[in-house]
Structures are given as C-alpha cells and as structure tokens.
Amino acid sequence: MQKILIIDDLHPAFKEKAMALGFEVDDQPLITRAQTLEIVKDYVGIAVRTKFKIDAELFNAAPNLKFVARAGAGLDNIDEAAAKAKNIQLINAPEGNCDAVGEHAVGLLLALMNNFRKADTEIRNGIWDREGNRGYELKGKTVGLIGYGFMGQKMARKLAGFEVNVIAYDKYKTGFSDDFAREVSMEEIVKHSDVLSLHIPLTNETRQMVKDEYFFHFKKPIFFINTARGEIVNTSAVLNGIKTGKILGAGLDVLETEKFPALSEQAFYQELKTNEKVILTPHVAGWTFDSYRKISEVLAEKLEQLGV
C-alpha cells in the first residue's frame, strides 16, 4: 500500500479521502524536519502547509516520492525546479481559500477607508473625534488589481456590490475581461487606481517588486492592500509612501519578514507598528475555519485526479 505523510495541520477531509483512494496515511502534524528526513524514503506523497521548506535535500532523501500536496495557494515554500528534476508532481489548492482572501482584502480596505483602527483606539482612550475620523466611500472609486488568477478574480467578485470600477493587470494572461473586472495595461493601473490590491505569487521576478519607484508612478493617492506575499513588497517603501501622501492607508496581511522575534528586529518595525494608517494581520487572509476544510477537500480532489 502506498503511503502519504502529513507533516502539518490539515483538515481530516484530506486524510479520509486519501484512505478511501487506497493510501495508507500517517498524520504527524508535530513532526520535525529532521524526523521527516529520516522516514520520508518510505512515502510516495507529502502533505504540507508552511512548516518548512520542501527542497532538494528532502527530495534526495525520498526516492519513492511522487507528489507534494501543498495545503494552500502558493508554492513558494517548495523548490519547484528540484521537484521537476525529480519528476515529482506538485498540487496546491488556491480554489480552497480564494473566498477567504477576497473577503479579508475587502475587510482591510473598508477598515482603512473608514479609519476603524484609529477611531476604535481613540474611543477606548476617551477621545471622541468625528471630524478626524471621516472616511471615504468605495462607490465610484477605481480598484486596480495586480494579478487575475483565483485570488484576483474573487476580489473582483467581492467588490461587485460596491459600485466600483475594477481594472486588472496580469502580465501572464490576456483576454480575461469579465463581468467583474476589465483587463488593462499597467499604465492604466497607475493612472486611474484609487485602490491597489496585489494578487500575485512570490517568484524571483516579483520579489521586492513593489518599492519606492513602483509607487512613484501612481498618479493619485492610493489605498494599498497586500494579501499575497510579503516579500513582494518593500515595507519601508510603503511607509515612505504614507509619509509623502502617495499612500492614504495600507492593509498588510503579509510582511517581508514574519513572526517574532524576527519581525521586531527589522529596522522598519517600530514605525510600522505605530503608524495609524496601517492595519496589520498575521498572514491569515486565506486561513479561515471554512478554508481549513475547503483546502483539504480541494487537495483530495486533485489527489484523485493525479492517479498515482
């Protein structure tokens, strides 16, 4: 019987389906990398979220490995080139958490445009300032999306009821205009956007793509949302943009350095945490109680389609 090793916290739906397909499944969410390297030779599949890098060292220790199932959208914690060299198939589940990401991004945007964080903090400290917390309406604004895959498309759908103009740029797609967004050039994004939201993967090309020069080209002050990957964005450039008025507010679910103590050691952290025009969440946009289940269900469907 072929064996699958689950090395992260996955909803039982994946394990149940895998067993129904005839696999033996070892569910070890607390296993360490060292322990995994010791036993991975016995498995044809690994299921992982973000615990550690799935790289050439691991592939070399796993001569029988046929696939890696990534419980999430991105594959940036997997060495895709090394997997391809070993003929190891990769499956992921952007369909499982795209609704969660879209809703979270809209939530960040509404909170920014209406000063929710600042207003809440002030009231808790005895300050009642209506004028200082006047917000903006979404209606009539132009929302620019960078990337129009699963995440970008869901963001556009979530915005449909707000009577906004949604435009999207995707370097690797053409002819994708639909009822929810209009395909445009990058020149149109920087000319017309009131809001900019990122929905692209982390690659060598996109790493640190969004920096001072990137924001410089925008013709209007923007609200900026990042629920994609933190390493795409230079955080200091966001803070600079806020100081110069290029950015009216930033909603950041992801950062170029995440988790503590590493985050607190960054030069930008003190300014970031005290800036009232920034809302931060701990990389949870795609991680809801609902997506926890849906991701495993999508992975299970794709496992069946692999036919290994």
Image (cartoon, helix red, strand yellow):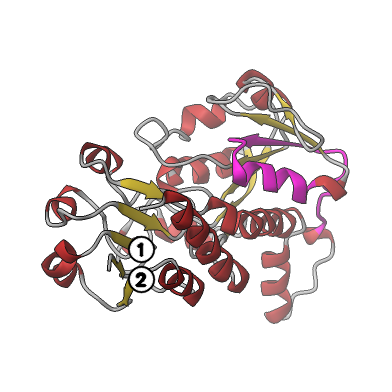
For the point 17% across and 65% down, the residue is 42
Which amino acid type is marked by label 2? Asp
Determine whether label 1 and label 2 are within 8 Å by CB.
yes
Does residue 151 belong to the magenta stretch?
yes
Q: Using the image, determine if residue 187 lies above or below residue 152.
A: above
Mark 1: few/some/many CA within 10 Å (<14, 14-19, 20+): many
For the point 73% across and 81% down, the residue is 126
Residue 123 showing in the rendered view? yes
Q: Left or right: 269 with respect to 242?
A: left
Q: Nearer the viewer, residue 16 or 40?
A: 16
Q: Using the image, determine if residue 91 lies above or below residue 146.
A: below
Which numbered disc flags the more N-terminal residue, 1 or 2?
Answer: 2
Residue 281 showing in the rendered view? no
Q: Which mark is residue 94?
A: none
Q: Left or right: 60 with respect to 70?
A: left
Picture coordinates of residue 19, whole percent (x, y): 41, 72
**Which of the 4 image quarters holds residue 182?**
top right
Q: Secondary structure at mark 2?
A: loop
For the point 35% across and 68% down, the residue is 23
Identify the residue position indicated by label 2 in the image: 8
Mark 2: few/some/many CA within 10 Å (<14, 14-19, 20+): many
Q: Nearer the viewer, mark 1 or mark 2?
A: 1
Picture coordinates of residue 76, whole percent (x, y): 36, 47
- Stretch in magenta: 134-159
Identify the residue position indicated by label 1 in the image: 47
CA distance for labels 1 and 2: 7 Å
Picture coordinates of residue 272, whole percent (x, y): 48, 57
